């Protein structure tokens, strides 16, 4: 809970940024897994949990299918980008091996 009626809480809410999916500048960045934030490690097995998208759709949010479709498109593009990057890296490593450097 954020004390939204105080100046400190209002400033905190002004700094808060929420996105649906992964926004443009961050979709090309390398993604990392933070082990300390994993649900499996943070929650005990008997605890209940919910996802924000499921909760939002229960309360009237109507864009869940759209976000799932866009996320699917993003994943296809991301996979193609990753395959191309791996191929370029592999080709560069092979070309470095072929080149003889004389000192």
Image (cartoon, rainbow, N blue to C red):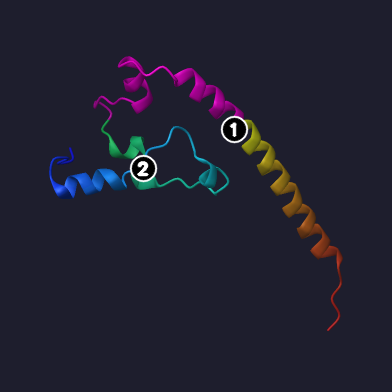
Looking at the image, which residue is at 30% across and 17% down?
59
Residue 45 in the image, given as x and y percentages of width and height: 28, 28
Q: Nearer the viewer, mark 1 or mark 2?
A: 2
Residue 88 highlighted magenta (yes or no): no
Residue 4, picture quadrant: top left
Residue 54 in the image, given as x and y percentages of width and height: 36, 21
Is 4 drawn above or below residue 76 in the view shown?
A: below
Residue 59 highlighted magenta (yes or no): yes
* Horizontal side of residue 50 vs 79, given as left or right: left
Which residue position is annotated with label 1? 75
Q: Earlier in the sequence, mark 1 or mark 2?
A: 2
Query: Which mark identifies residue 103?
Result: none
Looking at the image, which residue is at 59% across and 33% down?
74
Residue 52, picture quadrant: top left
Label pair 1/2, CB-CB below 8 angstroms: no
Q: Secondary structure at mark 2?
A: loop
Q: Magenta region: which residues?
A: 45-74
Label 1 – label 2 distance at C-alpha: 22 Å
Secondary structure mostly taken by the magenta-highlighted segment of the chain: helix
Is 28 drawn above or below residue 99 in the view shown?
A: above
* Horizontal side of residue 44 vs 51, given as left or right: left
Q: Nearer the viewer, residue 75 or 25?
A: 25
Q: Nearer the viewer, residue 69 or 4?
A: 4
Looking at the image, which residue is at 38% across and 24% down?
53
Which residue position is annotated with label 2? 17
């Amino acid at each position: 809970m954020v004390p939204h009626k105080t100046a400190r809480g209002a400033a905190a809410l002004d700094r808060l940024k929420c996105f649906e999916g992964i926004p443009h500048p961050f979709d090309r960045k390398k993604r990392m897994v933070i082990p300390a934030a994993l649900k499996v490690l943070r929650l005990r097995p008997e605890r209940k949990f919910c996802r924000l998208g499921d909760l939002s759709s229960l309360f009237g949010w109507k864009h869940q299918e759209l976000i799932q479709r866009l996320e699917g498109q993003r994943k296809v593009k991301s996979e193609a980008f990753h395959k191309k990057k791996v191929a370029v890296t592999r080709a560069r490593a092979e070309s470095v091996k072929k080149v003889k450097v004389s000192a």
